Image (spheres, rainbow, N blue to C red):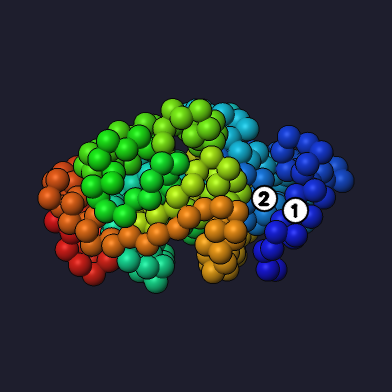
């Protein structure tokens, strides 16, 4: 299936707009009725592919497993839903490993600034030893995690006041960042004034001037319509981020092995399709966002990386993550950061 604006909207209209979440009702009451939550808008490829997985799982389990999808932070802010996941209030949660680091500190190592130069390096690392390392850390914290990470994308900086062309442009810049020490540390190293704000509140924070800018992948900027409250978009590619599909261990253990296999297989297959969707969107997003009013500029990543190194950012996070984790990161990207 090729994701287009039309297919996304048609799918959303057919399956979800009449209800506060996406649900395909089984013919009979399901033996297992589980919830999955995320912070992504309804028409983001993640939720389109989750809706497909939902139907496939229901069919493959003969109606035994019913999955309800709650997009757009409907069950609360990311940090709140993480608490619900741990307590069993929600059974599955798609979450950035960098936000997950509030519980699992080393899960955020893929988000080290300017570590990944391109997607080939990302997938080699995240489908390889670096991803395996993160999953081991997550499992060690008592959560279940699926094998394949979903794509969020390379993050870019937007502003209502000026283009960000050099590190100096970030000095004193009021920027929204997600709730995570790594994000705060990254922009503090540039001399910015980062404000940790959950995604559901980003649009309003930009609209009211609480912050002057934010950073996100282009796909998120599109579905959130951020061109309405921002003018400039600087292609910094300062961080790659994804979404792990996390599960509550007790809820997962309550499923028979055959149902576990069906759920895991379909979640992982949906992740691979979603990666393809994001790749296809990335080819056209810049033009679409320019047409909606964004003014783009390209930034030299080396100048920003050098500034972070000068500020001690890499040395600090090498110490935080530890030598083992840092060695896995540098082996995955094929170069030395600190």
- Kindly identify the residue that appears in the image at 19 percent across and 50 percent down: 308
Q: Nearer the viewer, residue 206 or 188?
A: 206
The x and y percentages for residue 12 are 75, 49
Q: Residue at x 29, y 57 (%)?
A: 114
Q: Is residue 233 left or right of residue 25?
A: left
- Compared to residue 138, the image places residue 125 above or below, namely below
| Number of numbered labels in the structure image | 2
Secondary structure under tag 2 reads: loop
Instruction: Estimate the x, y position of residue 211 in percent, counting from the top left.
Output: 41, 32
Q: Quadrant of residue 89?
A: top right
Q: Quadrant of residue 284?
A: bottom right
Query: Can residue 232 be seen at all in this image of the molecule?
Result: yes
For the residue pair 179 and 138, the one nearer the viewer reads as 179
Q: Is residue 212 left or right of residue 26?
A: left
Mark 1, secondary structure of its residue: helix
> Which residue lies under the disc numbered 2?
43
Residue 298 locus on image (x, y percent): 37, 62
Q: Earlier in the sequence, mark 1 or mark 2?
A: 1
Taking the image as shown, residue 32 lies to the left or right of residue 78, namely: right
> x, y percentage for residue 318?
17, 49
Q: Are marks 1 and 2 in contact (CB under 8 Å)?
A: yes
> Image quadrant for the N terminus?
bottom right
How far is mark 1 from mark 2, CA to CA? 7 Å
Q: Tell me the residue that label 1 is attached to.
A: 9
**Residue 304 vs residue 23, the one in the foreground:** 304
């Amino acid at each position: 299936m090729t994701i287009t604006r039309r297919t996304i909207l048609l799918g959303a209209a057919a399956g979800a707009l009449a209800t506060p979440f996406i649900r395909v009702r089984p013919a009979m009451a399901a033996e297992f009725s589980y919830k999955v939550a995320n912070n992504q808008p309804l028409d983001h490829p993640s939720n389109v592919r989750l809706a497909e997985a939902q139907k496939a799982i229901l069919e493959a389990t003969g109606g035994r497993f019913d999955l309800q999808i709650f997009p757009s932070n409907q069950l609360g802010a990311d940090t709140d839903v993480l608490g619900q996941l741990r307590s069993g209030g929600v059974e599955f949660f798609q979450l950035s490993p960098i936000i997950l680091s509030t519980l699992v500190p080393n899960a955020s190592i893929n988000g080290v600034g300017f570590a990944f130069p391109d997607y080939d390096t990302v997938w080699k690392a995240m489908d390889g030893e670096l991803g395996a390392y993160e999953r081991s850390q997550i499992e060690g914290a008592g959560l279940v995690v699926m094998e394949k990470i979903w794509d969020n994308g390379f993050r870019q900086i937007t502003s209502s006041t000026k283009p960000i062309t050099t590190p100096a442009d970030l000095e004193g810049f009021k920027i929204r960042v997600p709730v995570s020490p790594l994000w705060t540390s990254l922009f503090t190293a540039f001399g910015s004034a980062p404000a940790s704000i959950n995604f559901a509140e980003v649009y309003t924070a930009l609209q009211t001037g609480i912050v002057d800018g934010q950073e996100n992948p282009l796909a998120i900027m599109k579905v959130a319509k951020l061109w309405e409250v921002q003018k400039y978009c600087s292609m910094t590619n300062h961080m790659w981020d994804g979404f792990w599909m996390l599960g509550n261990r007790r809820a997962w253990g309550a499923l028979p092995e055959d149902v576990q296999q069906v759920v895991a297989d379909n979640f992982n297959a949906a992740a691979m399709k979603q990666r393809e969707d994001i790749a296809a969107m990335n080819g056209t997003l810049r033009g679409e966002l320019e047409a909606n009013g964004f003014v783009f500029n390209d930034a030299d990543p080396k100048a920003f990386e050098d500034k972070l190194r000068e500020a001690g950012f890499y040395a600090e996070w090498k110490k935080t993550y530890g030598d083992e984790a840092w060695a896995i990161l540098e082996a995955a990207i094929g170069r030395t950061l600190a």
